[in-house]
Amino acid sequence: MPHCQPRTPTGLTSRCIGTEMKNSPYLDKPLVPLAVALRSMLAETEAKIAMAAPAEKARLPQRAEVLREWITPKSRKLLST
């Protein structure tokens, strides 16, 4: 049974709140590590390049390059202070 919150000091009332909260559909999907997701996105992008229309052939390689950069580990250099 829903209940309403009391009036605030400003005189405004908040909306009624139900006893059950419904989750959004995206919350039901399993979480995937970013490295796994990026590799999957890169594979999909590379597969699309072969079948892409001329307009897409310019941007898809750029997208693939960005994904490769994100996947490639960077060396961590210590900064001297």
Image: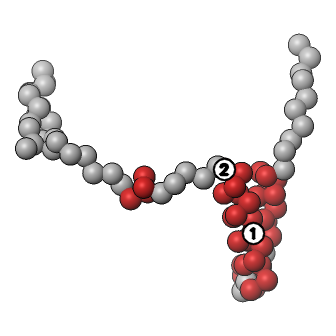
Looking at the image, residue 43 lies above or below residue 47:
above
Q: Residue at x 79, y 83 (%)?
A: 50
Q: Residue at x 64, y 49 (%)?
A: 33
Q: Classify the position of the C terminus by image quarter.
A: top right
Write down the residue under mark 1.
43
Residue found at the very far top of the displayed protein: 81
Write down the residue under mark 2.
34
- Give left or right: position of 34 versus 24: right
Q: Residue at x 27, y 51 (%)?
A: 22
Q: Earlier in the sequence, mark 2 or mark 1?
A: 2
Amino acid beneath label 1: Ala
Q: Is residue 35 visible?
A: yes
Q: Find residue 3 and report its horizontal and vertical position in percent.
A: 8, 38
Looking at the image, residue 74 lies above or below residue 31:
above
Q: Is residue 59 visible?
A: no
Q: Residues within 10 Å of mark 1 (few under 14, many from 20)?
A: few
